[in-house]
Image (spheres, rainbow, N blue to C red):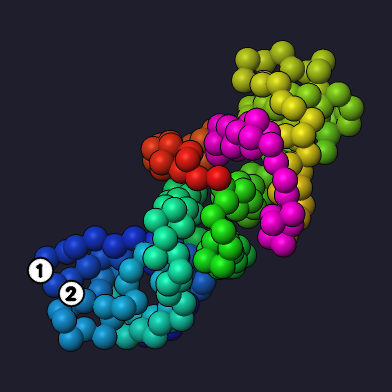
Amino acid sequence: MYQRTDALVLKSFDLRETDQILTLFSRELGKISVVAKGVKKPQSTLRGLVQPFCYSQFFLTRTGEMHLITQGRLGEFFGNIREDLDKTLQALYVLELLDKSTVERDPNPALLNLTLQVLRYIENNPVSSVSLRFYEMKLLGAVGFAPVLDRCSNCHKADDLIYFSRASGGAVCNSCATESSAVRILPATLAVLRTLQHSGLSILPRLRLNPSVLEQTEKVLEDYLEFYLERKLNLKSVMRTLKGVR
Ligand SMILES: [Zn+2]
């Protein structure tokens, strides 16, 4: 059975001498593993398509549990990202987060579109860690874990929202902030989190954030992601690498 699909390459690893196994995030099939036979031979037409963050059209055939790539056509290559180390690290972080927050064969075209938008943003704009915070917040919404930010996630009151609790699922008011995971947050941090949740990418170049707000926003989202994705995220080390990138 043949199938055509548009997909983003998340990662690849070698299988035997000339073959590779790729993890794709496919529009139609969700996250899948596919075999690219002979891709490491110099004459292979697939060579240009199988690198991380290539977005391409793939023709697949299925043998048992595995998909095989028979042909492909390159869509987007993200060349500017590849030429810049900081941009490359950011894009790899985006792919890592997408990989860790999804299960196989659960299509999510909205999440694919979001990821492509953020990669295009990274490709075409100066490096800024805010684009990663935007991706984290929107990804949480796309996988059904959007934090509650406009009222207390415990008692639903709209005032005194000066804490954030990952266990309660978002902002919490002064009187509900008893459980241990609640952390005090700056009003400006809550405002940034709300902006990231409700706005499109076009807001990012206009956001002027002081370092303490940016740092707190990063910490809140990192803790929340770890808690909700319930995976052993390999994010910390990547994030540490990115700390110097602002
Ligand atoms: Zn409350």
Q: Quadrant of residue 114?
A: bottom right
Task: Using residue 207 as the reference point, say whether residue 129 is left or right of it.
Answer: left
Residues at badges 2 and 1 in contact (C-beta under 8 Å)? yes
Instruction: Judge whether 69 appears above or below 29 on screen.
Output: below
Instruction: Give the residue at mark 2.
Output: 40
Image quadrant where one finds the C terminus: top right
- Residue at horizontal 72%, vertical 13%? 178
Instruction: Give the residue at mark 1.
Output: 17
Disc 2 residue lies near ligand 1 with CB under 8 A? no
Residue 141 location (% of width, % of height): 66, 50
Q: Secondary structure at mark 2?
A: loop
Residue 46 location (% of width, % of height): 28, 81
Residue segment shown in magenta: 201-225
Q: How many marks?
A: 2
In the image, 139 versus 228, the foreground residue is 139
Label at residue 51:
none
Q: Amino acid at mark 2?
A: Lys
Inter-mark Cα distance, 2 to 1: 8 Å
In the image, 193 versus 126, the foreground residue is 126
